Image: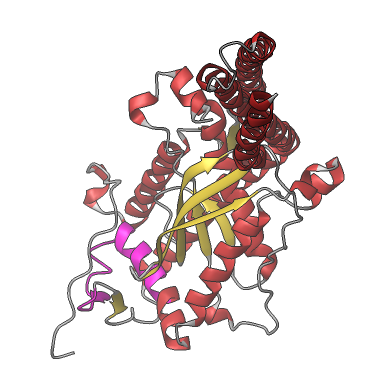
Amino acid sequence: MSNTKHERPGVLFRQAALLPFVAALAACVTSETRPLPKVNPVQATTQIPEAELLDVGVRIFDANIPAALKDDEEALAKKRIYPEVRNAEAGYLPGLLRATLETSGQWGAVRVVPEKAIVDVIVTGRILESTGAHLALAINVSDSTGRVWIRDKEYQGEADLGSYKTEAALEARDPFQNVYSEIANDMLAARNALVSADLRDIRRVTSLRFASDFAPDAAQGYLATDAHGVARVARLPAEGDPVMERVGRIRERDLAVIDTVNSYYANFADKVESSYGNFRRVSQQEIEKEDRARASARTRTVLGAAAVLASVLVPNQCGASDYTCRNVQSAARTAGAVGGVAGIMSGIKKYSEAKVHAEALKELADTFRAEVTPQVVEVEGRTLKLTGSAEEQYREWRELLRQIHLEDTGSAAAAMPVATGPAPTPPPVSRNE
């Protein structure tokens, strides 16, 4: 009897010692879902003067698919990167940022633009992570003078699960609208840090940079850079300058092409909005199930192993002649070991379930991939394939516009190869100026 009395407190002590451990593991599989507070872009309350109303160009984002893993689908899937979906997102997500900026009323024309487009403010981005549950972007913003507004800042957020509840809710607000609103508000803060003269200068520099790209000889000397590398207007063209007026007409044609590119991406976004929204919703659900299955598997496996270990290491507390106590203790050890092994096997089963959910994500990505086929548009009799080659097609149009300018001016340079690189660096400002 004495041995049994000593054994019971020992067993109870060991059970009590496991409670904090079990509670900690249980916390891994329990999460509380709270509605996310909504962040909205700051709306314009007064009319902005035309000369200070900056146009914004949002470039296609960098899909950021690791080069070392580009041919390893399994490794990419483990990181929840599906190249076809990620490449589609690189064209889709900029449209969501464009719409956010546009609805704020704080800017002029806001477009999704090709890489070589010259506009007042340029936004570039890199996708760091994009799933139905989490979005992270690295954003850069600068203006045409070369002034940096935002440098490689990371914006991230969890999905607003309220947007996934119904089709109407998904159409009404993107699950990651807070991310785009934060970017828009940071851009507004950067713009508001500039004085009116700076804003007007940006508009002028944009026009002169375009002129420098098409007619470098005629536009020479109009721009200069200060000690910080920011372009400034050194002097303005004479009023009625025929070359600059011709360049102005060419710029109008260029903006028409940019509008066409922007319309393509808008149409692309409209086409995939529903399927992509559903993809992200189901993706979020699958990720949640997978995470829960893995957490449950981890809990069951660890507790199972702990039970086996406890049954093996439990000290002998029975007297040498107390056979009843020994039989009970042996049975307890066996039951603990069997129960522990069962827990481990249950954990392994849960890991298998997690793998099934991971495979479901891959199938969802394949389904979405089938709905983002390339688009072809007609612009002034030319066919543009506006997918991954949109940048090349736009460069062709820039070359055509440049040739039109050379033909109009009768320049002998019309027969020369056309450069497609960045605009030439303006000369530095003289210290005497």
Q: Quadrant of the C terminus?
A: bottom left
Where residue 231 sits in the image (x, y, percent)? Answer: 29, 73
Q: Is residue 156 visible?
A: yes
Q: Residue at x 86, y 42 (%)?
A: 166
Q: Quadrant of the N terminus?
A: top right
Q: Is residue 330 above or below residue 222?
A: above
Residue 244, by quadrant, is bottom left
Residue 432, by quadrant, is bottom left
In magenta stretch: residue 364: no
Between 164 and 326, which is closer to the camera in this rendering?
326
Q: Residue at x 55, y 45 (%)?
A: 261
Q: Residue at x 59, y 70 (%)?
A: 107
Where residue 169 sits in the image (x, y, percent)? Answer: 83, 48
Magenta residues, as a range? 204-228
Coloring basis for residues = secondary structure
Q: Image check: 232 left or right of 104?
A: left
Where residue 239 sits in the image (x, y, percent)? Answer: 39, 82
In magenta stretch: residue 205: yes
Between 142 and 186, which is closer to the camera in this rendering?
186
Q: Image check: 318 left or right of 71?
A: right
Q: Is residue 371 visible?
A: no
Where residue 249 sits in the image (x, y, percent)? Answer: 47, 62
